[in-house]
Amino acid sequence: MKIEDKPYLLYVGNAYPHKNLERLLKAFKIVLEKEPSLCLVLVGEVDYFYQRLQKFAQDLDLKKKVIFTGQVQDEELAWLYQNGLAYVFPSLREGFGLPGLEAMKHGLAVVSSNRGSLPEIYAKSAYYFDPENVGEIAEVILEVIRNRNLREKLKKRGLEQAKKYSWEKCARETLEVYRGVKNSVIK
């Protein structure tokens, strides 16, 4: 099945248990009852955890609706971000949440877990759900994909939020911290 033929949700990252992808698949099954043309695209290196997830998708009878791409080239990843309906980030805990910011940078609406650092990093640029509540995950996904105005608002906010973060800014601020520590030690 070609991805460009279908509307899709996107997840990019690994499939470690704390990423909560099994609940995402359960929620996606609920979403499909109301939006049967939708697909879920999962991008990440096919390792032990992704193989387990592939089996889980098969057990849920989702094999034809969930696309496991494996790793993709940067150009292909950019295309996936630019053409999806929403990026879904169901993580139970996260240190920073870089893929969501990357999705925002490419103009993709973000639907995210309300756990860990994600609400702080994404602020009002994402639509949040309780990652342990499969029904709530499905409801929030449905609301975002069905409500074009909400999706557009999230896209605009996301583009602004993503501008707040860059590797150059991170390097500059880190250097300033090092200089501050060096100066305080020398005195």
Image (cartoon, helix red, strand yellow):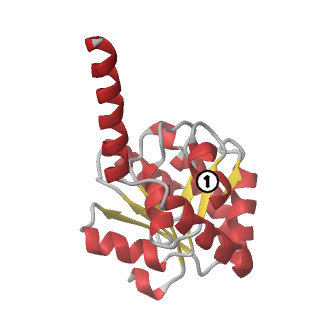
Along the line of sight, the residue nearer the viewer: 150 or 35: 150
* Residue depicted at x 59% and y 52%: 122
Residue 168 sits above or below residue 91 on the image: below
Badge 1 density bin: few <14, some 14–19, many ≥20, Cα 10 Å: many
Query: Does residue 76 appear anywhere in the picture?
Result: yes
Question: Where is residue 115, by image quadrant?
Answer: top right
Disc 1 marks which amino acid? Ser
Along the line of sight, the residue nearer the viewer: 82 or 47: 82
Work out which quarter of the rendered image holds the C terminus and state it. top left
Q: Secondary structure at mark 1?
A: strand
Q: What residue is pinned by disc 1? A: 112
- Find residue 174 and report its horizontal and vertical position in percent: 34, 36
- Find residue 59 and report its horizontal and vertical position in percent: 51, 55
- Asked whether, in this view, residue 6 is left or right of residue 44, the answer is right
* Residue depicted at x 40% and y 74%: 80
Q: Farthest front residue? A: 187
- Find residue 124 and report its horizontal and vertical position in percent: 68, 57
Question: Where is residue 77, by image quadrant?
Answer: bottom left
Q: Farthest bottom residue? A: 5
- Asked whether, in this view, residue 177 is left or right of residue 30, the answer is left
